[in-house]
Image (cartoon, coloured by chain):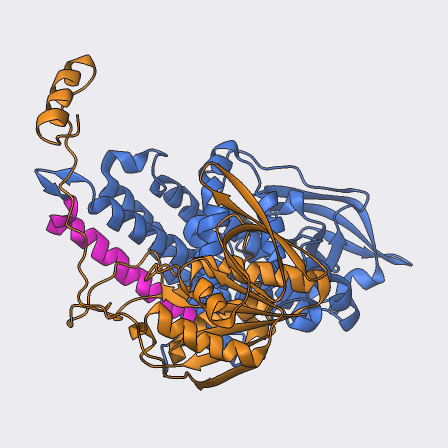
Amino acid sequence: MDFELNADQKAVRDMARKFADEVIAPGVRERDIKHEFHADIVKKLAEVGLLGGPVPEKYGGAGLDYISHAIVTEEVGRVDSAVRTTLSVHISLVELTILRYASEEQKRRYLPELTSGRMIGCYGLTEPDAGSDAANQQTTAVKTDTGWLLNGNKMWISNGGVSDLALVFAQTDKPRGHKGIACFLVPTDAPGFSAPIIEGKLGLWSSNTTELVLENVEVSDDALMGEVGDGFKIAMGALDSGRYSVAAGCVGIAQGCVDASVKYATEREAFGRKIAGFQLVQELIADMVVQTEAARLLTWKAGHVKNQGESATFETSVAKYYATEAALKAAGDAIRVHGGYGYSNEYPVERFLRDAQVNVLYEGTSQIQKLIIGSHVTGVRAFT
Amino acid sequence: MKIVVCIKQVPDTETKVKIAADGKSLDPAGVDYVLNPYDEYAVEEAIKLKEANGSEVTILCLGTEAATKAIRTGLAMGADNAVLLKDENAAGRDWLSVAKTLAEELKALQPDLIFFGKQAMDDDSAAVGTAVAQILGLPSVANITSFALEGATATVQREVEGGIETLTATLPAIFTAHKGLNEPRYPSLKGIMSAKKKPVEEKAAAVCENGTEVVSMALPPERPPGKVIGEGVEAVEKLIDLLKNEAKVL
Ligand SMILES: Cc1cc2nc3c(=O)[nH]c(=O)nc-3n(C[C@H](O)[C@H](O)[C@H](O)COP(=O)(O)OP(=O)(O)OC[C@H]3O[C@@H](n4cnc5c(N)ncnc54)[C@H](O)[C@@H]3O)c2cc1C
């Protein structure tokens, strides 16, 4: 057992930390208030290779190990969860899914484009009536002579309106249920494809969240990833990797809450002394620190298992469940430490709270994580 | 063309330094070390030249084994290889000792062009680059904010009181980099991952006597907290009084 980061991991952390503080952090409040997507940041992330971290070098990535991948994601999540969401979807749900399930030709066609940022990706699984119950796909794929005809609606798709390539899950044969689902690589400029924006979100204001509308979208045979019927397996495999990234991003939020709270508590005075000198304030901070540490260790544990080549479904669910709840709790407590000021956008903690909330929902709600964990340890599935 | 960039590993500017028990050195415990910020400009300039004309860029560093971290930053930014002159007591050397040792190695490396940062953020002596030039008898310009090369002639600029001075020098020559020379790049992930595959030659640093000895180190006296004496016009009289009689600056 070795808790020490190796030299590569430290170098990656130093770079990602510096990049997050110097490039991402300065405009975060303004982008948030203006609900403005961070296109310029994405370009800069690409320049330093941060859009392709764990993808092997031969496909344009940097071949990072999973601990390094978590470290990068944590550092980005520490300052901006909207940028982190873009990264999580682009890298973990799209690139790593293509890497794991696509044909060699599809990998060569798309991965270099994605890792270089020439293409941005999105992942379209959720539908108006298929969220937790993702197998209930209503989007249809009908075989034609030359390929497939796609029809349907996707809901809550991150990067939807800014992406060039969408992974779209669709039902090919309703009676077969989840065994009829297939996954398609759909160019977003295909006729009949549109991505109406979803407004009025609680948080992630500068993240681009849209519906996907597919009206007679034609794709060729080589748009199919894996085999017909592999779709559900691919969707779940993608989530193993996406949830890991969400967990790491939430370690970042929690760490951001610790940093902000320590700073504020050692500056703000009440009753003639620094509020850090009150035991009840220290309790808030101590709990935050413990949960941040625990979340990070659980995430790295899942990363360790992934580094061995395993999909780490169980470990990832444990980390995702714990880290997302820890981030949400930390953000609420960080606002308490800041008092009334924490409730205003003069400080980052109100944004941390708004941005933390979605993490206990997307890529499987906390309830769904508990069902995965429960079925893993009891051997009994309790989903339906 | 062969370029050498001399770098130093220094405590991160964010760390709160503590003075060690001996009262004349820094306590290394809990200190995070980084590539000296001014040296980043030096590395960046060398790498820009490499990209333009295919130069070979070597990092030269006198330091402890731990300085490999700063060396790797330089390699990750794009330098080709490195030499580490190892001395577990590197922090105890003054600028003269460091300059003599580096000059010795530079004689062997025979570069066409040598960059330094203008000063190290820890001891601030701002002497080593210029001292090496003196020892090697090479032309040098300190604190450069722009650099251009044509053939063997470098044209550089430096800020002087109230203006900008433009100078030329024939290579081989030494330049020390100031903020503004360029915008140092972030090492890319690929750069970081390839850095470990680049050759780093380690050898014992030559022993060279110090010219000076540190007698003691002390932190600056703690500043008393600021005080608010009032607001608006009413405060003016009190302020003038305090500036006259307490601060004695008027
Ligand atoms: C900002 C944002 C970005 C998103 N980005 C994407 C994206 O990029 N791609 C994508 O495909 N999706 C995305 N989603 C969708 C997200 O993954 C779903 O919202 C999520 O999976 C929950 O599905 P649902 O909203 O349909 O909720 P429902 O499934 O309707 O759940 C409602 C409630 O019922 C509970 N519940 C449901 N089933 C069970 C059960 N069996 N046992 C116990 N409790 C249960 C849930 O835990 C929850 O509390 C995003 C969502 C948001 C808000």
Closer to us: A21 or A102:
A21
x and y, in percent, of residue B223 in the image: 16, 44
x and y, in percent, of residue A23 in the image: 50, 48
Task: Describe residue A218's horizontal placement relative to residue B87 as left or right.
Answer: right
Q: Residue furthest right?
A: A145
B170, above or below B221, in the image = below
Q: Quadrant of the N terminus of chain A?
A: bottom left
- The residue stretch that appears in magenta: A275-303
Q: Colour of chain B?
A: orange
Q: Colour of chain A?
A: blue
Based on the picture, tell me whether residue A276 belongs to the magenta stretch.
yes
Closer to us: B125 or A194:
B125
Q: Residue at x 17, y 54 (%)?
A: A283
Task: Describe residue A113's horizontal placement relative to residue A364 as left or right.
Answer: right
The answer to whether any part of residue A105 appears in the image is yes
x and y, in percent, of residue A288 in the image: 27, 56
Q: Residue at x 51, y 66 (%)?
A: A69
Q: Main secondary structure of the magenta part?
A: helix
